[in-house]
Amino acid sequence: MTEETSGSTVPRRSLGIALESARKRAGITMQGAADRVGVSVQTVRRVERGEVSTRPSTVEVLCDFYGLDTRMRDVLIGLAKESKSRGWWHSYGDVIPRWFELFVSLEQTARRIREYAPQLVPGLLQHSGYMGVVIHTDLPHLEEAEVAARIRLRQERQQLLTRSFPAPPEMEVIISEAVLLSEPPADGVMRQQVWHLLKATELPGVTIRVLPLSANPHRSSSTGAWTLMDFVAENGNTPPATVYSEDLTGAIYLDKPSEIDVYEQVWAALDKQVLAPEQSIELMSHRLKELTDREA
């Protein structure tokens, strides 16, 4: 059933999450799954933890056993085939259901999240009004009910930062001053958003620093937003750090040491140009006053 791999761990970790979820929904024990494919319970456990890859043919048997439809079976078999890729590209679309959001799954298990945000406020720190503007801009065809549903989902995701158990991850954000100076086409939205950012800085694990407009060009000047996640060790195993970034058609996940090193170096370079947390709060407070005075 298993096969060690030197490729990206992201597909097999994602596959493990999906298989465990499907097994539990079907009311099947690990022993039942193990008996079905002729392996040990320990092997099933390692696959579900994403520690090892598994053959597409085995995934197909498990999908049938768990009662998954053809569409989801194709997704999971595709993940099994991707387990040796150098980096994994996740293409969005109807073929991947809402619950199967790999990034959110990884985010929930991270011990530390670092995010570079040059254009938009990061999703975990967005106010509901700002969310609506972003969603409408990205998907202008959506009905209001669909937009409201997406906002609720983002708000549920934000509970990660205030949960009691397990402890919330440390979150460090570098946000461009340009984001604070933007003017969304809706009254009061930016004022609410800046206030929301200031409230977020009161959370014990959240640090927001601003990259001023006067900053020199840096190695991320020509890139979009990206997120670097570190994870908690489980059973003596520490999943590798993972970088996530997206564009208009999909998202890429990187977890090779050489790739992570590049992003660590970029973060260190940015760290030298950003304002200190206290200065960043002062700048955001000044922006909030400016917006409030304008609306008075």
Image (cartoon, rainbow, N blue to C red):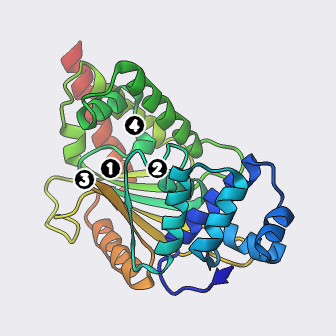
Sequence-first tag of 4 and 1:
4
Q: Tell me the quarter of the picture where residue 53 sits.
A: bottom right
Identify residue type, mark 1: Gln
CA distance for labels 3 and 2: 28 Å
Q: Name the residue beneath numbered marker 3.
A: 118
CA distance for labels 2 and 4: 24 Å
Q: Is residue 232 visible?
A: no
Q: Name the residue beneath numbered marker 4.
A: 126
Tell me residue 34's x, y (percent).
Answer: 80, 70
Tell me residue 267's x, y (percent).
Answer: 34, 69
Rendered-image quadrant of the N terminus: bottom right
Which label lies toward us, 4 or 1?
Answer: 4
Q: Residue at x 28, y 30 (%)?
A: 136
Q: Name the residue beneath numbered marker 2.
A: 96
Rendered-image quadrant of the C terminus: top left
Which label lies toward us, 1 or 2?
Answer: 2
Crowding around mark 1 (Cα neighbors within 10 Å: few <14, some 14 to 19, many 20+) is few
Q: Residue at x 28, y 53 (%)?
A: 249
Identify residue type, mark 4: Gln
Which label lies toward us, 2 or 4?
Answer: 2
Sequence-first tag of 3 and 2:
2
Report helix, strand or loop for mark 2. Answer: loop
20 vs 112, nearest the viewer: 20
CA distance for labels 4 and 3: 14 Å
1 vs 130, nearest the viewer: 1
Q: Name the residue beneath numbered marker 1.
A: 279
Identify residue type, mark 3: Pro
Tell me residue 163's x, y (percent).
Answer: 65, 43
Sequence-first tag of 2 and 4:
2
Number of residue marks? 4
Crowding around mark 2 (Cα neighbors within 10 Å: few <14, some 14 to 19, many 20+) is some
